[in-house]
Image (spheres, grey):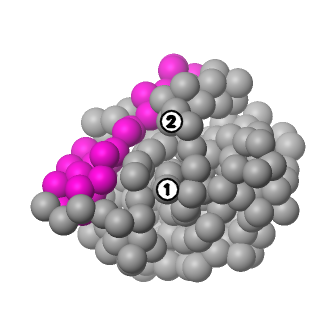
Amino acid sequence: MAQSRVAKEVILVPGYGANPGSDWFPWLSRSINDEIGIPVTTVKMPTPKIPRLAKWLSALKSQSGNVDENSYFIAHSLGCVTLLRFIESLPDDTRIGGVILVSCFDEPLRLLPIVNSFTAVQPDYDAIVRRVGKAIVFSSTSDILVPMRLSEKVRDSLRADYVQIPDAGHFSAFDGYTKFPQLFDAFNKMIS
């Protein structure tokens, strides 16, 4: 196991209906911990199928501890907009090592209106960019829940690097994503 020189912690933020055992989260957590030597926390959201922004922000805050330039976040779908709102709420002098957002959005979703309260107010991207060292956005050409244009909009707002994967769906287990080597590689490169 290699010891990381940069990152001290990774926080994974699942999306709607997900938990620490869903999709690629267990695989990614093990891979980062075993292969890079960084401890990983996967946030357990309250009522993942009945999301409420205040409760999700509280869970993210309490489970991520003290964040700083050695903290890295990886979020999926509704976890992305939750993470963006969390970052904008941090003190102005807070710096985060980096974020990776998978199937991110900041506008209402036509096919999943239960999550639209999370996008009622646009994130303060200027405040977020000041706090985040590096950012990468992943999107899929075949994501029917989060259209690619929404992830591209977030990418532009964050001035993030961008990885587009053809026909990956919503990057869920349903779409065959119980492992996500491209994400692991992007994270490993981010902390190098």
Label located before the other in sequence (1 or 2): 2
Q: Is residue 146 left or right of residue 178?
A: right
Q: Secondary structure at mark 1?
A: loop
Residue 57 sits in quarter: top right
Q: Position of residue 56 (x, y in %)?
A: 60, 28
Which residues, given as a range, are shown in magenta? 24-52
Name the residue at 34% across, 45% down. 40
Work out whether residue 95 or residue 14 is closer to the camera in this orientation and state it: 95
Q: Give the number of the disc on residue 70.
A: 1
Instruction: Give the residue number, with chain letter if any, for mark 2.
Output: 64
Q: Around disc 2, counting alpha carbons within 10 Å, would you say few (fewer than 14), some (14 to 19), or many (20 or more)?
A: some
Q: Which quadrant of the rendered structure holds the N terminus?
A: bottom left
Q: Is residue 61 left or right of residue 32?
A: right
Residue 119 sits in quarter: top right
Would you say residue 9 is visible in this rendering? yes
Q: Position of residue 174 (x, y in %)?
A: 32, 51
Q: Around disc 1, counting alpha carbons within 10 Å, would you say few (fewer than 14), some (14 to 19), or many (20 or more)?
A: some
Is 62 in the magenta? no
Would you say residue 186 is visible in this rendering? no
Q: Which quadrant of the rendered structure holds the C terminus?
A: bottom left
Query: Of circles 1 and 2, which is in front?
Result: 1
Q: Position of residue 170 (x, y in %)?
A: 45, 58
Q: Which residue in the rendered view is the most extreme toward the left?
A: 1
Name above or below for residue 128 compared with residue 13.
below
Name the residue at 44% across, 45% down. 11
Which amino acid type corresponds to the residue marked 2 in the rendered image? Answer: Ser
Is 40 in the magenta? yes
Q: Secondary structure at mark 2?
A: helix
Q: Position of residue 90 (x, y in %)?
A: 73, 42
